[in-house]
Amino acid sequence: MSTPGYKSHISSAFNAELEDVRQRVLAMGGLVEQQLVDATRALMDLDGDLADQVRANDDKVDQLEMVIDDECSRILARRQPTASDLRLVYAVIKTITDLERIGDEAHKIAQMARDLSRQERLNHHMMETQHLSRQVSQMVRSALDAFARMDAEAALSTVRDDVKIDREYEALMRQCITYMMEEPRAIRRVIDLIWCVRSLERIGDHAKNIAEYVIYFVKGKDVRHTSLEDMEREVLGSP
Amino acid sequence: MSTPGYKSHISSAFNAELEDVRQRVLAMGGLVEQQLVDATRALMDLDGDLADQVRANDDKVDQLEMVIDDECSRILARRQPTASDLRLVYAVIKTITDLERIGDEAHKIAQMARDLSRQERLNHHMMETQHLSRQVSQMVRSALDAFARMDAEAALSTVRDDVKIDREYEALMRQCITYMMEEPRAIRRVIDLIWCVRSLERIGDHAKNIAEYVIYFVKGKDVRHTSLEDMEREVLGSP
């Protein structure tokens, strides 16, 4: 089997099951990525139909989460995996929770796009929001690429990106608040935009979580809640 | 063993391990509950020291999550549980993710309390926020009680409570927005309060998730992303 990072088994059926669950996570990831892109486009173009489509597709994300959870619990019961196989299943169980919540946030952005499409056009901070959304989408893609290749260094680079996202989020939030103070008439619309910006920041956090599960799988070490320096030491080795 | 809902094993060591992991989840739950109570009190009293204490205790929540995850993966590797034992471990893995995120939201509320303690006092909507916080705390407690007793009906009642929380959240949010429009000078402070209100609503969602894992454990059926009616049918049986 050519899949990187996990060993080949005497049971080819077990191999196939692990590969299948991995492929499903990537499919779920691809769908969630598309949801984020569509939700952002709905927001930029104030396209209510596209927003409705995102809402409808959220069910597919939820279904995939349930199917993969079910598959993982079957593998645990029947194959009783150990070592790196168990870490893979564990990483999958955690990853799909974050993917589902990225889907949820995309859904919320779509709902705000729907709301905003019914109001007077808001021109402020849309470009900055689009920019943040592109960065966040890129981060989700990187996390999924790292998962696909089970590449700890790529995962580390995804974790690093979250710092930039958080900085950009803070700056944009400050601008939105200042704008509301200058233009109280726009408050309702700016609040809708603020929810979108907040959702984008949360999506960055979820992508970071996924990257951390990749490091856990590859290195066998739980790096959540540790500093970036400790994570670098774990992934790149001692300086 | 007197623990409700799961069977006794020939291996008393295995029994002890399952009971231990269950107790740790309840300890983590107790800590998270206290964090929420303290964060809300810090917000109401604008008590910066208490806010700092919540911030410091968040590390303990994070550590408990990692310890329990480690314990679960050891149990999976060594005991290779099946049927209801496996469902228990699965429910624990999912539950602690939500508990950690409730802790995170309490931490965010504490940060906002810190921020607000440095600004002119905000008198509006504090009572309503406190009321929402009490309801949400009650919901977290119910979810943890349902988990402790592995009681699907109690879990169902927790899920039902989320509807009320969401309604109260929406009403409070509308009031906050109206107040900002009337009092643009207060925008910065109201936004801080809005983050707290949003965090409370998110905590309600996490408590609902925990309740759904209890139903999964007891009934062997994944009820996430289903309607309340379907959930009632699953838990209470056909009408």
Image (cartoon, coloured by chain):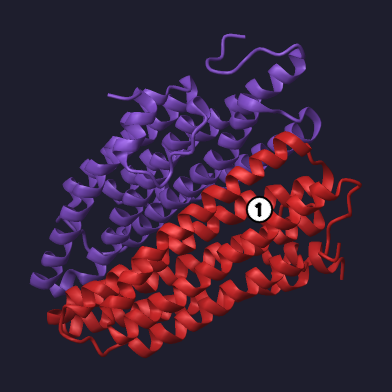
Chain colours: A purple, B red
Quadrant for residue B1, please give it.
Answer: bottom right
> Is residue B55 shown to the viewer in this render?
yes
At 31% from the left edge and 56% from the top edge, which residue is drawn? A198
Q: In which quadrant will I find the C terminus of chain A? A: top left
Q: Is residue B7 above or below residue A133?
A: below
Q: Amino acid at mark 1?
A: Val
- Residue A208 image point, x, y percent: 38, 40
Depth order, front residue of B162/A112? B162
Question: Is residue A45 or residue B227 the one in the foreground?
Answer: B227
Q: Is residue A53 visible?
A: no
The residue lying furthest to the right in this view is B10
Residue sitting at 32 percent across and 73 percent down? Answer: B51
Residue at the spot 39% in from the left edge and 75% down from the top edge:
B39
**Left or right position of A11 against A210:** right
Determine the chain carrying the residue at label 1: B
Q: Position of residue B33 (x, y in %)?
A: 52, 72
- Establish if B45 lies above or below A126: below
Residue farthest toward the top in the current orientation of the protein: A2
Q: Position of residue A182 (x, y in %)?
A: 8, 70
**Residue B52, percent from left and from top:** 30, 70
| Residue positioned 83% across, 69% down in the render | B236
Horizontal side of B31 relative to A46 (left or right) equals: right
Q: Give the labeled residue for mark 1.
A: B92
Judge left or right: residue B109 versus residue B26.
left
